[in-house]
Amino acid sequence: MMKIIFAIIVFAAIAGGIYVLTGGPGVRNGSPASSAVPATGVFPQDVSDLPEAKPTPEITLGDGETYDVGIFPVKKKIGDTWVRMLSYNGSVPGPVFRVKEGAEATIRLKNDGDLETTLHSHGLRLENLFDGVPGVTQEPIKVGDTFEYRLKFSDPGMYWYHPHVRTDYGLEAGLYGTYIVDPTDAGYWPKANRELSLTLDDIALGKDGRPLSFDRGETDHTLMGRFGDTMFVNGETDYRFAAAPGEVVRLYLVNTANVRPFDFTIPGAKMKLVGADLGRYARETFVESVMLSPGERRVVDVLFGMPGEFPIEHRTPEKRYALGSVSVSGSPIAVSYAEEFAALRENRAVAEEMNPLFGEYLSKAPDKKLDLTLAMGGMMGAPSGMHRMSGGGMMEDAMMGMGDDGETIEWEDEMAAMNTGSTTKTLTWKLRDAATGKENMRIDDWKFKVGDKVKIRIFNDSSSMHPMQHPIHFHGQRFVVLSTNGVRNADPVWQDTTLLPKGETVDILLELTNPGEWMAHCHIVEHAEAGMMMTFSVEK
């Protein structure tokens, strides 16, 4: 009943054009200020005279090397329709960069895209100047200009890169790619026959098969985020690869979607979870599926023991979605690591690093508290997009989508018309400091020093006007989840992004090792555009 009442309130609020101004000096709609984006029209969709997107290459970056990357439009066929997308060096996704742990390299980025941009290397503990946050670490790169990013690859694992200006449009248009950082310790990961980088994504297409338009001056779908109706693995709607019987394939998985959580599975194959955002787990586990919210990464070893066709799927409590398949055939692999795969390793070095942290901080009172919530208020003119209703209209859509099902994660957009009509002018998503009441970019007292370890309690308020899950990402540092709803985390791993389902409380321990001014935000990118971001500083 509360959800239905909320639906009526939100319908009235959006229809009436509720408008909330957030932020302070240097802040627009809760986001760091940048040069003005044209405030009228939509981003282009014409594919005339565009080159066809190329396959994604894998490139080895050597220590000290400089590599040129260009952003420019391409056309890519999705279904039966050629679609205009943005590329890094002509491919969607952009190149997979392989680099050794401890190496440093430079990406020289040329911007020939649709708007100013930056390059954020998600998860890397790099120098603050090259974190790619407009108005915080740099001015955005104007169209036609170039910027050099000096990157440091401190930790083994998988990382990814994307813009931090209008990220909602950039990700939907195809601007993302991955780094794989190979460990210096040959025994760091279990043995595998080969490794693949897989990006999980979706895109929202209209009835004509073309992407839904994006307004240049305003982000829409801010209530829930822009769910896509077409899903990708590595930019393909039917991703396929082949394997030999007995082969162990390591999959580096990342969720690059604007909002959709993915529960990744390969039914019939055996899967073992070995790593996450910044390296390996203290203890490996066999799993049937791997859950990733936007921004998160997982490292999964898969054993294909027998010949056959194995589907690649995303599953929700209600549905299964086909993402592709694996064809296993031919002679058995010459060297099989099936025996090693069967052993669940205890990573002593990780345990020895983690156990003292849990002993000292698990029961300690939090140093900082954040509440995740939503606000609406003040009546103004009706926002753009309100005419775009489907089915029986916005109210019917809301009433059908607000059932009290008890789910803590929203897997689909069940309020499509209301979500489409919500913008940065109609609502504000909030990170609220519980001690001071300050919100989003007005939070100004999170000041730490290198060497500090800060316990942060994050609460996702289930009584807010529209509670939903939030993946919270901290730039430039790493953290470990200590507990969820007071229950100790049994599978610790270093992370930079963690999912908070609605109504849950998560305690994290943030390790401050990297000086500078850094961002923390929700990685549902429409929520970040609608205010859900803050900064924190780390002094030497």
Image (cartoon, rainbow, N blue to C red):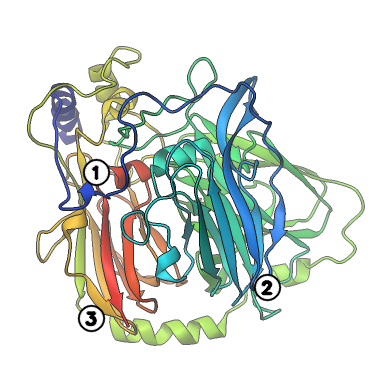
* Residue 15 in the image: above or below residue 225: above
Q: Residue at x 67, y 31 (%)?
A: 51
Measured Cα–Cα span from mark 3 to mark 2: 35 Å
Task: Please tell me in which quadrant of the rendered image residue 386 appears.
Answer: top left
Q: Is residue 474 left or right of residue 93?
A: left
Look at the picture and state if 371 lies above or below 18: below
Q: Residues within 10 Å of mark 2 (few under 14, many from 20)?
A: few
- Residue 117 visible in the shown view: yes
Residue 439 image position (x, y, % from top left): 16, 55
SS class, disc 3: loop
* Residue found at the very far front of the displayed protein: 144
286 and 106: which is toward the camera? 106
Give the residue type at disc 1: Pro
- What amino acid type should be assigned to the residue bearing mark 3? Lys
Q: Could you tell me which residue is drawn at 21 percent across and 61 percent down?
A: 370
How many discs mark residues in the rendered view?
3
In percent of width and height, residue 16 lies at 13, 23
Q: Which residue is mark 1?
A: 467
Question: x%, y% of residue 475?
Answer: 38, 64
Left or right: where does residue 259 sit relative to residue 8? right
Give the labeled residue for mark 2: 343
Res 259 seen here: no
